Image (cartoon, rainbow, N blue to C red):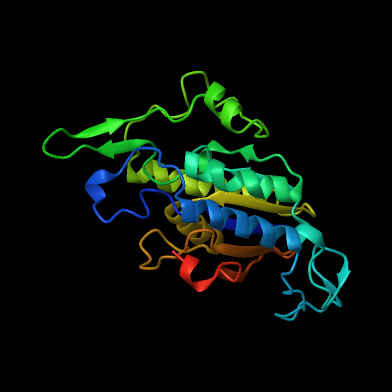
């Protein structure tokens, strides 16, 4: 199985100079909307020429694709399934990717950002929780999305601010599901978030929770992971932003 982890494009919160202006479920900025179109075009072009076998694979084919070495990936990087979180910025990023790949984004609630839907209102007012977009709101704004039963008429989040232990357990749960699917000859893309993507990678490579390491992702940064047939996980590259002009890297 091949996995592409894509961070969402720049959100309003990402661009703030004063963090007191944060909102619970921020939309993309104008730059973010452009980033989303650019990453969609890149993924659809299939111009990832990372195909030559390495690491002693002992084969003249690109593992998991049946293609001869050096030919690169098929159109659309071979992506057959597209998942995204239920947060607005991820939905907005996944929409043009889905159109470019002719795929319907599937909402996977578990890949949302650390903390869930919450906002610290400051000045002693404390934490205010949110519910996330409702089923009807997502269907109206993103009609191509496939929704799981976790997205209800009352939204998809009801836990206030997510604590650290449940967040780590959620990352482990997603990693376990991906590992369970690893034997399948399929290429998957997940549009997720900087914090969640970092901890998902930690789970996939077996880094302990105490490890002082963080896998940074710029907005629309792409990480490619290969689940090898021998059970090993290969990080082919991390946080690639070749699809963005320098002044669009955020």
Camera-side residue of 61 and 85: 85
Q: How many marks?
A: 0
x and y percentages locating residue 203 in the rendered image: 51, 57
Residue 200 lies, with reference to residue 173, above or below; the image says below
Look at 36% across and 42% down and name the residue there: 115
Look at 56% across and 59% down and name the residue there: 204
Q: Residue furthest top?
A: 153
x and y percentages locating residue 11 in the rendered image: 43, 50
Residue 78 lies, with reference to residue 161, above or below; the image says below
Q: Is residue 249 left or right of residue 222?
A: left
Look at 52% across and 40% down and name the residue there: 110
Camera-side residue of 9 and 59: 9
x and y percentages locating residue 225 in the rendered image: 64, 63
x and y percentages locating residue 145 in the rendered image: 65, 34
Position of the N terminus by quadrant? bottom right
Q: Is residue 20 left or right of residue 39?
A: left
Residue 231 lies, with reference to residue 117, above or below; the image says below
The answer to whether residue 30 is seen in the rendering is: yes
Look at 74% across and 69% down and name the residue there: 47
Camera-side residue of 125 and 53: 125
Q: Residue furthest left?
A: 124
Residue 215 lies, with reference to residue 136, above or below; the image says below
Position of the C terminus by quadrant? bottom left
The answer to whether residue 9 is seen in the rendering is: no
Query: Hey, which quadrant is residue 62 in on the image?
Result: bottom right
């Amino acid at each position: 199985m091949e996995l592409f982890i894509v961070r969402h494009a720049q959100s309003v919160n990402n661009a703030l100079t004063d963090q007191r202006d944060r909102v619970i479920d921020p939309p993309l900025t104008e730059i973010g909307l452009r980033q989303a179109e650019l990453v969609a075009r890149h993924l659809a072009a299939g111009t990832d020429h990372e195909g030559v076998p390495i690491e002693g694979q002992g084969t003249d084919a690109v593992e998991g694709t049946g293609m001869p070495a050096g030919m690169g990936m098929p159109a659309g990087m071979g992506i057959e399934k597209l998942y995204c979180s239920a947060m607005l910025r991820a939905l907005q990023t996944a929409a043009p990717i889905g159109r470019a790949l002719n795929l319907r984004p599937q909402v996977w609630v578990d890949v949302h950002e650390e903390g869930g839907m919450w906002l610290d209102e400051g000045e002693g007012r404390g934490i205010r929780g949110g519910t996330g977009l409702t089923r009807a709101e997502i269907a109206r704004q993103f009609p191509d999305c496939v929704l799981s039963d976790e997205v209800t008429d009352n939204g998809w989040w009801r836990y206030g601010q997510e604590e650290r232990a449940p967040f780590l357990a959620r990352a482990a749960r997603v990693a376990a599901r991906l590992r369970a699917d690893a034997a399948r000859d399929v290429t998957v893309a997940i549009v997720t978030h900087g914090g969640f993507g970092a901890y998902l990678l930690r789970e996939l490579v077996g880094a302990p929770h105490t490890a002082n390491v963080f896998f940074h992702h710029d907005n629309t940064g792409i990480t490619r992971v290969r689940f090898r047939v021998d059970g090993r996980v290969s990080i082919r590259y991390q946080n690639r932003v070749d699809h963005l002009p320098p002044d669009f890297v955020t």
